[in-house]
Amino acid sequence: MTASGLVTATAPRVLLVEDEPTIARAVVDRLVAEGFAVDVAADGPAAVDMARACEPDLIVLDVMLPGFDGLEVCRRVQAERSVPVLMLTARDDETDLLVGLAVGADDYVTKPFSMRELVARIRALLRRVQRPAPDAASAPHPPVLRIGPLEVDARARRVRRDGREVHLTPTEFDLLACLARNRGAVLTRAVLLEQVWDWADASGTRVVDSHVKALRRKLGPDLIRTVHGVGYSLDSA
């Protein structure tokens, strides 16, 4: 199902994957009113097929779906084409959140959520992925940052630890690059939310914590230091 409403041909296209009709209709109405073109799928297989057919700019993806769940949808979609994914979860469970991040989700919202928050998260995520790559000639930081065993290549968006390439999601890379540019400095969660997620407030600090945990699982626990009550710092191992 497609709901485009009064939107322009260049309107961002969002694929909403939600099996509860009441929630789906409310989200569609709000997104169309905000100027988005919206496609809707109500189960896992349909979501994968529609993502392939309409090539959305962003996917809003419920975790609990018929057919197969949102985690499997995210895994299959990301294997074919990199696309920003905002997951909707009915449970504020740390394990579910980490699994979602591990299969390629960029952000999540816990039900029940406000439409205002959902739209703000969608716009922030779209701004981040549409941000142009820095020009190496004018960039204030070296294109390749080396911190101990870690190598962060800003232009190629590649990360290596001990010479071995580590696959990161776009959000994980942006978070690591922000910490690397500020090596040794302690960045608060609010600062990270603003610089990485483009959030103007600090209402979603758990998303930072979850992404740091995902980075530690991929890079090892010895690089990102927690400063309790303050934030995080990237230090040499």
Image (cartoon, rainbow, N blue to C red):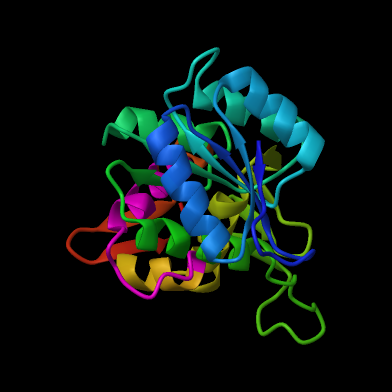
Residue 199 location (% of width, % of height): 42, 70
Q: Residue at left 69%, top 38%?
A: 164
> Hey, which residue is sitting farthest top in the picture?
67
Q: Quadrant of residue 68?
A: top right
Residue 46 visible in this rendered orientation of the protein: yes
Q: Is 212 inside the magenta-drawn segment?
A: yes
Which SS does the magenta portion mostly show? helix
Q: Nearer the viewer, residue 134 or 72?
A: 72
Residue 236 visible in this rendered orientation of the protein: no
Up-down relation of residue 51 to residue 235 (above or below): above
Q: Nearer the viewer, residue 186 or 76?
A: 76
Q: Nearer the viewer, residue 171 or 38?
A: 38
Q: Is 157 inside the magenta-drawn segment?
A: no
Quarter containing the N terminus: top right
Q: Residue at left 72%, top 35%?
A: 51
Residue 200 location (% of width, % of height): 38, 75
Up-down relation of residue 174 to residue 95 (above or below): below
Q: Residue at left 71%, top 64%?
A: 11
Q: Quadrant of residue 162?
A: top right
Q: Nearer the viewer, residue 72 or 9?
A: 9
Residue 218 location (% of width, % of height): 52, 37
Point out the stretch of residues depicted in magenta. Answer: 196-216
